[in-house]
Image: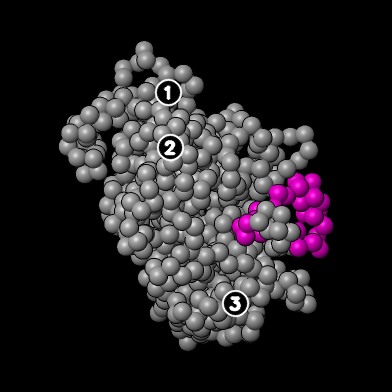
Amino acid sequence: MPKNKFTDTVHHQEPDYDRPLFELTPEKRDVMLQRLKLVYGEDLAEVYIQELERILKVYSAHKPDAMFEREASFEPEERFSEADIILITYGDLMEAEGQASLVTLGEFCDTYLEGTINTLHILPFFPYSSDRGFSIVDFETVDPRIGTWEDIEKLEGRYQLMFDGVINHISSKSRWFQEFLNGSQYYRDFFITYNSPDEISEEERSMIFRPRTSDVLSRFMTIDGPKYVWTTFSRDQIDLKYMNPNVLMRVIDILLLYVRHGADIIRLDAVTYLWSQPGTRCVHLEQTHEIVKLFRDILNTVAPGVAIITETNVPHRENISYFGNGSDEAQMVYNFALPPLVLHSFYSENATVLSEWAGSLEAPSNMTTFFNFLDSHDGVGLMAVKDLLEVEDIAGIINRARSHGGLISYKSGENGEDVPYELNITWYSAINNENSDEDLAYQVKRFVASRVIAIVLKGVPGIYLHGLIGSRNDVDAVLENKSNRAINRTVISRHALEDALQDPFSKISRINRELGRLLNMRTKIRAFHPNGPQKVISVSPSIFVLLRHTPELTDPVLTLTNVSERVVSAKISLDDLNSEVSHWFDLVSHMEWFAEEGSIFITMNPYDIIWLTPYRK
């Protein structure tokens, strides 16, 4: 059983109404009621708080008795720990002939990732019509092409699971939208629609923050004639209308269904676009934050071990607003600024901006933390560093990535121009030029050094499966799928991967040995607990230096990463470490270091990694 696992969260299939029914305390009921009032007004709130109570009663009737007992002793400060490392993957990203993809994934993780990965983020595993799973046809069914709910629940017995709540939109092929097209009275108000595109003025359109370059309205023919429907992402992804409280109630029901099937973490995909209202930017609206807070209230009440993570590819200050006050909104947010800052550091061979930013990085409470990732199924977002890097620095990242075979996706800017939104490139190709004649071992060393930044930084590290094995750009997939993001979504043959792992000289085998060893080591070092403090120490522009302590302020670990291809020397004062210890031990190389005259003098080769801890016999 993985460390730090709160509980097996799979519930009974049938509700047990013989037990006393769940009752909201007056205090919690009032908090939820106030949130509904802010969003919908007093009259509707009084009606829908009753429906919400009914949903919570039904959910709680599915919970095993033992779960109530374990929840009573749950400590939210220990929801995440140093043992948490999250693998990001599609349910069908790995295949083996004659076997369900989810089973293949589980067996591979059991065999090769034991002791490192304890959490699986399985990207949307529901039936879908486009966008590689993010245009969901049915929120409540596992795509039969990859497995069943039973397969998901078996994984839950061995790993913590992160499910996607793709609740901003739904597929145009979904029953909900088809019912709307057919004139169903119930679904008529589930979507934001207009009789004419002119009902949104040019001024209102110019205010909308768009993650795409397509028109925000898509024309559909319905039983009542043509309608123009709000589509933030694509014509096939129909935004849900949260102004209708029935939509919110249905979504709450679905999220609790995910908890019943084993979700330990719920990822709110593109949640910043949840509430769309002409005359505003349609992002980060007060109603959106209030709904996320309501989700948190609900889970705190009936499933306290389940955490919320928000995915918001926006400037850093806006991104971290989803922490709320540290106790009322998301427990974890995607650290979107990290990937482009790491690329900037390795491209410029200068970690100054990364160090300054990391020095200011602070979660608002010990119940919240950052999700430190470098790559994902999408790419490397650029919006988060808009206020952190100079325009020429961002342009430099884009040009370097292009020279490494990367592609660029765009969004509509405030003046209608196309603005770079994300890099589409694998992490290995982003770090290493495929046309270079560099030695493979040297490329692997650079790659591992870049990944270590996310491992040592305060928070919980996440690694996309292609980033774990060092996949290169798949340009053929881009041409075949006519999608830039396909460059990093190639299906992997389990048997081919296992064969490569058996070859000690292969790239995958080298990465597995070096990166795998560091990941395994991290899970045993309490100084990497998300609530352990961190201090950035400035010794050289080419070295990223981070001092970590345990939450109890003991057992420090000093991490140093050379982001350059140069030999670099550094002097680290014991005063900066707030320590009088003169004898230190490198957990990575097993070398011993001694302080002289109150300082440790270190020389690092290109892309060296050092983790120093006070020496113990």
Mark 3–mark 2 distance (CA, rounded to whole Å): 47 Å
Q: Amino acid at mark 2?
A: Gly
**The quarter of the displayed image where residue 150 is located:** top right
Q: Secondary structure at mark 1?
A: loop
SS majority, magenta: helix
Q: Which residue is disc 3 drawn over?
A: 399
Farthest-out residue, top? 18
- Residue corresponding to mark 2: 225
Q: Secondary structure at mark 2?
A: strand
In the displayed structure image, the side of residue 454 where residue 368 appears, left or right: left
- Above or below: residue 314 compared with residue 104: below
The disc placed on residue 62 is 1
Stretch of the chain drawn in magenta:
483-509
* Mark seen at residue 146: none
Residue depicted at x 75% and y 46%: 494
**Spatial separation of the CA atoms under disc 2 and disc 1:** 43 Å
Q: Amino acid at mark 3?
A: Asn
User: Which quadrant does the C terminus fall into?
Assistant: bottom right
Q: Amino acid at mark 1?
A: His
